[in-house]
Image: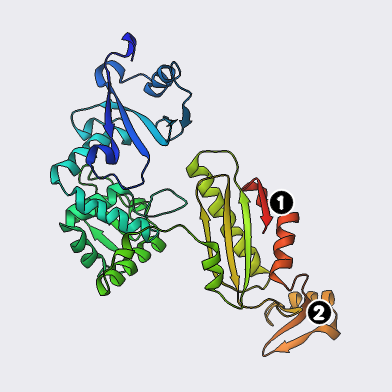
Amino acid sequence: MNTKTKKAVVELGGSGSKNTWSKGNHDIDLYVKFGLNEYKNKDISSILKKELKRHFKPMILHGSRDYFQIIMENYTVEIIPIMNIKHPREALNLTDISPFHCDYVKKHDKSKEIRLAKAFCRTNKCYGAESYIGGFSGYVLEILVIHYGSFVKLLKGASKWKSRMFIGNRTDIENLNISKKMGPLVLIDPVDKNRNAAAALSYEKYNDFINACKKFLKNPKKDFFIERKFDEQSFIKKHPNKEIIILEAVTLNSKKDVMGAKLLKCFNYIKERFKLNGFNIMHSEWHWDEKKSAFFYLVFDNKEISSTARHYGPPASAKKGMQGFIKKWGKGNIKKDGARIYTDIKREFTKPKQYALHLTKNDRNIMNYVKLLLLR
């Protein structure tokens, strides 16, 4: 830092500071702490950006306060401007509290247990608080291990979690804003009692974690900690005699979290379109290694569906609607199903691959989410 920013100091943060770094993790967090008195009314993000540009070509990431990313060899370094405060109540921004999270975790000295919890969640696909994942953040796992006392005690406790779980002082939980208590797990941040640390956790990942805990306790083995890359051929072999559609989605240029969120929306949109056209998806999943393409995998129980779809008319009580329905489709094409009438409509698509090709070539809504969609 130059003389204009002499009241700013750089400090290692995140898992590197807490000694909870996961194997294979190449992310480094650096806090640039600005003196509160000197910079309270200044845009510390702009000041830091100007300094970084003197030596690097940082990527600007937008959050509650802009921060920066630099790729150095195999490492992703995130540089986060914060206020140098003495107590969490002095925070001007949520990120200002981050060093207190580090202090809390280091004080309890459960780094080995926490690393086990992180490896367990990574392997069982429930790690990462990014919006497109909706899993457990590193800090949430750190709080949980400290709360329960060890990794195994966490697993035993989590295996008994109900559809919703509340952890923390009862008064603190009751005082939380209702919007912060919508998810499956309400976990009071021990550093900031007004925050649910697990607010980003989805029900899907919550349940995945509970099921993984139960499986491990029933049959503990090393496989629960060994993360394996997705293997397409193994996936195909697991679904013999089924129709498997593989779609390649080329991402738009954006930050990782934004790209991931758009990919997830695209994946869900495609599944919904298949269902609306009468196709039954037995199983679906998507994989992305944060490169330019993601892959969507859809498994269908049949290679072809019926050539017609049953289209029901309005309720019998809606006489005008009934008359309009009969007029539109012709009286000779109307049939009865109990108290309701319907007509059989010829499907435009009867094969999953046929409809997948149509999506890739004609559905312009796809372009809201990805640059290109290809049928493999």
Q: Position of residue 7 (x, y in %)?
A: 26, 16
Residue 4 in the image: above or below residue 154: above
Give the residue at x 60% y 58%: 269
Asked if labels 1 and 2 touch by Cβ distance under 8 angstroms, the answer is no
Q: From this viewpoint, which residue is outermost toward the top?
A: 3
Name the residue beneath numbered marker 2: 326
Front-most of residues 283 and 279: 283
Q: Position of residue 277 (x, y in %)?
A: 69, 69
Which of the 4 image quadrants contains residue 356? bottom right
Q: Is residue 189 left or right of residue 265?
A: left
Give the residue at x 69% y 69%: 352
Task: Identify the element where label 2 is drawn.
Answer: helix
Image quadrant where one finds the C terminus: bottom right
Q: Nearer the viewer, mark 2 or mark 1?
A: 1
Whether residue 169 is visible: no
Q: Position of residue 326 (x, y in %)?
A: 81, 79
Task: Identify the element where label 1 is drawn.
Answer: helix
Give the residue at x 27% y 36%: 98
Which of the 4 image quadrants contains residue 20? top left
Give the amino acid type for the residue marked by disc 1 in the picture: Arg
Whether residue 288 is visible: yes
Mark closest to the chain's N terminus, 2 or 1: 2
Q: Position of residue 21 (x, y in %)?
A: 28, 44
Q: Is residue 325 left or right of residue 301?
A: right
Q: Which mark is residue 364?
A: 1
Image quadrant where one finds the N terminus: top left
Give the amino acid type for the residue marked by disc 2 in the picture: Ile
Q: Which mark is residue 353?
A: none
